[in-house]
Image (tube, rainbow, N blue to C red):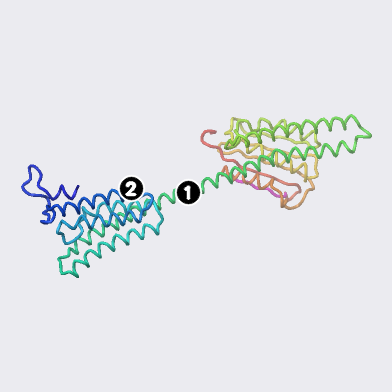
Amino acid sequence: MFTFLIRIRLPGEYEPAKTAGPFFYQWNGMAWLVVATVLAHVAGVLLRRRPLPALGLLLAATVFACVPLAVAEIPLAQFLAVDAALYFIAAGHARRTGIIALLGALTLLAGYLITRVLFGWPAGTSAELAVAMTAVIAWLVGHSVRQAREHADTLVATATAQAVADERLRISRELHDTVAHSIGVIALQAGAARRVIDTQPRRARQALGDIEEVGRETLSGLRRMLGVMRHGEQGQPLDSAPGLSDLDTLVATTTDAGVHVEVRRLGERRPLPPEIDVSAYRIIQEAITNVVRHAGTSRCRVSIEYRDDELAVEVLDGGRGPRHVPEGGYGLVGMRERVTMLRGSFSAGPRPEGGFRVTARLPLTAEAR
């Protein structure tokens, strides 16, 4: 239709935009245009499912449309449909398919010129080079779109995998922090009860009661966590997790197990962001658990300092535990991961004068300040 419109004189025009050959106005010339139009429509239907055969039909339609025009080259107007097809093929199909399509289009243009030269007809080489350039540009644009889409898909897949890995680490840390301290306290209480059950049955009953209470609390925490996992929620709500306000309960439980915990709070106490509050509590909990399990001492000290731009946590003991950082466990690893996620600093190691020190500095957000 576009070919027909630019080659006939419309109202208000002195002559057509382009002069057509005599064959254009004969019935067989019009038949060539009809065949080209039908092939172009069929190619449009097949383009999504069978791109290369569809492109072949478009190339054939391009040649058929040029038969009645008496032109020395395939004009750009007749090649626009092929350019559009090259874009869609390069953007929506494999790179190999796009390259084959581009080579097919360029081969047709070259073949058209070579045929005219061999028959001694005029050939519009310079104009055909411009048409070839538009084909290459259309393919490059489509190829860029496909690459951008693949890159976006890669980023989404990477982000999804990272989110899954972060969630697994979060669940493993929560399980470790929830269970490790409780099991350590239970083991300590059970040992104390076994030693005094014959001589001090009242104290043994108290220890067994503490074991029951700690066990119930641990079971309740595990049920909440499994409930979150069963319902597929992304991350347990931080407002339901323990924080520094629950530190007195933790200290009381540890003291009942035989390890006295001294707590020192420095600076002005104020509300903390949920992630800082939870992480500080979990770090203290894990450090106290290590004191109960490994230090071999009956005392430890916890210091919490509220600074202007950070929260500093320190846990000290003077026990006779190992003189090196324990290996093979996940407690210190989990603490370090928590601090790293909050872009803070963490250190843990033996003290020169004996015992062990755990320190963490958690930067406070602008909201907290």
User: What secondary structure is marked by label 2?
Assistant: helix
Density class for disc 1 (Cα within 10 Å; few <14, some 14-19, many ≥20) is few
Residue at left offset 36%, top offset 60%: 99
Q: Locate residue 253, reporting x and y percent.
A: 76, 33
Q: Locate residue 111, reporting x and y percent.
A: 25, 65
Is 72 located above or below residue 169 in the figure? below
What amino acid does circle 1 point to? Leu
Q: Nearer the viewer, mark 1 or mark 2?
A: 2
From which residue to which does the magenta span run?
Answer: 345-350
Question: Toward the viewer: 23 or 329?
Answer: 23
The mark that comes first in sequence, 1 or 2, is: 2
User: What secondary structure is marked by label 1?
Assistant: helix
Does 346 lie within the magenta span? Answer: yes
Question: Toward the viewer: 100 or 177?
Answer: 100
- Residue occupied by mark 1: 155
Residue at left offset 30%, top offset 49%: 42
Question: Toward the viewer: 368 or 253?
Answer: 253
Residue at left offset 36%, top offset 57%: 98
Question: Gap between marks 1 and 2, in whole Å?
Answer: 33 Å
Density class for disc 2 (Cα within 10 Å; few <14, some 14-19, many ≥20) is few
Is 290 located above or below residue 136 in the figure? above
Residue at left offset 48%, top offset 46%: 156
Q: Locate residue 78, reporting x and y percent.
A: 22, 54
Q: Quadrant of residue 342?
A: top right
Residue at far right of view: 199
Does 242 lie within the magenta span? Answer: no
Q: Locate residue 245, reporting x and y percent.
A: 66, 30
- Residue occupied by mark 2: 45
Q: Does residue 76 appear left or right of residue 332 in this picture? A: left
What amino acid does circle 2 point to? Val
Q: Does residue 368 appear left or right of residue 329 in this picture? A: left
